[in-house]
Image (tube, rainbow, N blue to C red):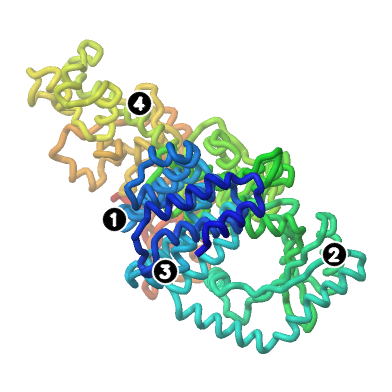
Amino acid sequence: MLRQFELIEAVKAYDPTADEAMLNKAYVYAMKMHGSQLRASGDPYFGHPIQVAGILTDYRLDTATIVTALLHDVVEDTSATRDDIAALFGEEIAVLVEGVTKLSRLELQAEHTRQAENLRKFILAISRDVRVLLVKLADRLHNMRTLQYVKPEKRERISRETLEVYAPLGRSIGIHSIASELEELAFEHINPTARTAIERRLEALKLEHGRAIEGVSTEVERVLSEAGIAGARVFGRQKTPYSIWRKLQRKTVGFSSLSDIYGFRVIVPFEDDCYRALGVIHRAWPMVPERFKDFISTPKSNNYRSLHTTVVGPGGLRIEMQIRTEAMDRVAEDGVAAHWAYKNKSYGFDKEGMQAEGGRDPLQNLRHLVQVIEHGEGGEDWVEHAKLEMYLDQVFVFTPKGRLITLPRGGMALDFAYAVHTEVGDTAAGVKINGELKPMRTPLQNGDVVEIIRGAKREAPTDWRSLTVTGRARSAIRRHIRGAEREEFLRLGRATLEQTIAKAGKSIDDVSLKPVLEVLAVANEADLFEAIGRGRISPVKVAETLFPALMGKIKPAQQRKPIQDARARLFVRGGGLTPGVSVHFGQCCTPLPGDRIVGILEKDKGLTVHTIDCQKLAEFADDDSVWQDLQWTPQAEQSAVGVARLRATVRNGVGVLGQVTTLIGEAGGNIRNLSLTHRQQDFFDLNFDVEVEDAKHATMIMAALRTNPSVDTVERVRG
């Protein structure tokens, strides 16, 4: 444990202006408040905050951060209050201590609350001041170093939380040294068998290649010196067991197939020297194709800058080279902490200096998660996407104007569009990748130039879950869908109530809805219409509340109301309703323009359209209030595209399937899906989902199929 004068000397060594009196007071106050408290190890509790402060002095942080580290547990674990901290140490310290205290309380609640809510609050707390996260990372690091004293049943939970939350957050702001140690300590408790096995393999490799590895640094320095690159330092490093374990999982390859277990760091004086050294190394030893990455011209979002290459080096060993300057190396290890500096007679975070080096805002990687939270997202899906974006490797792609966009690996066009701007994502209709039209589900690769083709309408794709991986994109689409749903259910509810009241010869315009709002405890008319549209409130009940004399007298309407559809857009009394939002087509009968149709108002789903002969309608025979009489408008019948499901029994023979699909194409049908449902020796059954213009078009296609002698029967599937 650091003694008081040792801590002060450590801070003053890098910040001569540090407030020595404040540091002394905080040290003494922490010891006094924690008093006789003991940790699980039996050591005095006050040793923990002092050790946390000591960890942060290694990262040269400002006085306020060190004081916060000393005090970070006093509000949570002693009689001290926030007001006490503010009075003794000032408002800045009080705010920081309060932020860390909130995170500590969330940790205590983690065993009893949903992880989603825990992580949501955690991200919001650390997003306001990066120093809160720095203290929390140091706190977790010291706790992990002493985890062996914790009860066994808690070790795995704490270790898994460390791997899933703290280590990724550390990497997101570039503090790889802390993140790496957290990973190793957690891995030791979660999977000690795998860790031991990897360590044994590494020891065996060291015995096999030890001498060759030792000579690489000297040989690379010699080659660089002879090429005129003075002052280069080269040193080797071995990958950590956890990083090897993750690579084995991610690449699904064996240990012997990994080519970069050993890596060498080449430190040169200037940025230009990085590229010169790269050329020298590539001339001296063969480069391994597709293993070069330039993170200097396109830094990672946590400000990491370096050149990476893999070569077949001395002795025929495949070795990874990282080439960078001293400044780049410090950022690579310490991340945002590397930008605390003494400037203009004060010491603190040097944002201008960071930006001058091409760096980015240290909280940039957290802000997209904050945006997701602030728009109301939550639940386990949010946790999944938050972890995904913290964990995954990144790809760097560009807009046509050269703006760099960073996405998780596996990101697609919609992820890119929403990363550019919400408006771009909402109106995305197609994508060009490197000048070529591509499907929206095409995974983006490093260096791709991506151009989003925008449409006039804002319609969320029905398969948007398979077209996005980022929480930001999925959150925006959900938000858009919620807004569209409310608007459309509101219009549907009003139209439904109007139709119900009209059955009794009344008009909604002739009455006030206030009595209904009071009886049903609904806030306003819009909420009432939405509840009717969602099927939560019966329109018959509303009508009978308005007109008590009509109790039991409202009958189903005989006159049909027009509803336009076709798969493109529906209209109820001139208001647009979108398929998949407030209006759905029964998959049981796949209605087509030209079919006789009826609508069923289902709770929390909206209006489902069925053909009049659909077998599912029997389920609603006793509830007249949910039936909506519908018919296709002329526009739908002229310009619609629907999907007909056809079932054909076909003789087993060479080329028969090709003949059948050709007939469908020649008849103007587009096959969306095809499945083999039953097969015998002589016959097999096929299901086709075919895009058609209307019911007549489907009938024509069936007639065309029947002309083939190998087609025994063909029919349209009807529920």
Which picture quadrant has residue 273? bottom right
Viewer-closest of 512 and 381 = 381
SS state under label 2: loop
Q: Label 4 sits on what residue type?
A: Val
Spatial CA distance of label 1 from label 3 is 21 Å
Which of the marked residues, 2 or 4, is nearer the chain's N terminus?
Answer: 2
Q: Tell whether 266 sits left or right of 120.
A: right
Label 1, label 2: how many angstroms apart (C-alpha)? 56 Å
Name the N-terminal-most of marks 4 and 3: 3
Query: Rounded to the nearest whole Å, what is the CA distance between mark 2 and mark 4?
Result: 77 Å
In this rendering, position of residue 31 left or right of residue 717: right
| Number of other residues with Cα within 10 Å of mark 4, as a class: few under 14, some 14 to 19, many 20 or more | some
Q: Mark 2 to mark 3: distance in Å? A: 42 Å
Q: Closer to the observer: label 1 or label 3?
A: 3
Q: State whether residue 116 appears in this view.
A: no
- Any mark on residue 572, and which? 4
* Residue 425 - label: none
Foreground residue, 573 or 97?
Answer: 97
Which badge, 2 or 3, comes first in the chain's sequence? 3
Judge whether 282 appears above or below 597 on screen.
Answer: below
x and y percentages locating residue 637 in the rendered image: 42, 33
As helix, strand or loop, the secondary structure at mark 4 comes to strand
Q: Amino acid at mark 3?
A: Leu
Q: Earlier in the sequence, mark 1 or mark 3?
A: 1
Residue density around tag 3, few if under 14, some if 14–19, many if 20 or more, within 10 Å: many
Q: Count residues near mark 1 (Cα–Cα under 10 Å), then give few for <14, some for 14-19, many for 20+.
A: few
Residue carrying label 1: 112
Tell me the SS state at disc 3: helix
Coordinates of residue 225 in the picture (x, y in percent): 89, 69
Q: CA distance from mark 4 to mark 1?
A: 48 Å
Residue 72 picture location, percent across and down: 44, 50
Q: Amino acid at mark 1?
A: His
